Amino acid sequence: MSRLIDIDELADYLKLKKQTIYNWLNQRKISGIKVGGVWRFDRKDIDNWLRSKKRESITPIQGDNP
C-alpha cells in the first residue's frame, strides 16, 4: 500500500473542495479508509480511479473537414 493521504491533501491533489470528496464518499464514487475518525486515501487507488474515468479523445475521420 502506498502512502495514505488525508482529505486535505486529496482535495489539493484533485483541485476540489473537501465537501465534494465527502459527497463522493457518501455516493461511493471513491473509496477511503477511516482511521481514528479521519478519512485516509491510498494515492494509488485514487490514481487508478482517475484512469478508469479517463475518456479517449475522438479523432476526426479523414475527409470530414471540407
Image: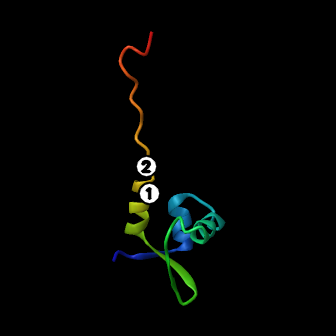
Residue 4 in percent (x, y) is at 43, 77
40 on left or right of 51: right
Camera-side residue of 1 and 23: 23
Toward which corner of the image does residue 61 lie, by quadrant? top left
**Residue drawn at the location 40% of the way across and 61% of the way down:** 47
Q: Which residue is mark 1?
A: 50
The picture places residue 44, in percent across and down from the top left corner, at 37, 67
- x 53%, y 64%: residue: 29
Q: Quadrant location of the C terminus?
A: top left
The secondary element bearing badge 2 is classed as loop
> Extreme bottom residue here?
36
| Label 2 packing within 10 angstroms: few (<14), some (14-19), many (20+) | few
C-alpha span from label 2 to label 1: 6 Å
Q: Find residue 26 and report its horizontal and vertical position in percent.
A: 61, 71
When the figure is inspected, residue 47 is found, relative to residue 9, above or below; the finding is above
Q: Residues within 10 Å of mark 1 (few under 14, many from 20)?
A: few
Tag 2: amino acid: Lys
Q: Amino acid at mark 1?
A: Leu
Check disc 2 and report the residue beneath it. Answer: 54
Q: Do the residues bearing badges 2 and 1 touch, measured as CB atoms within 8 Å?
A: yes
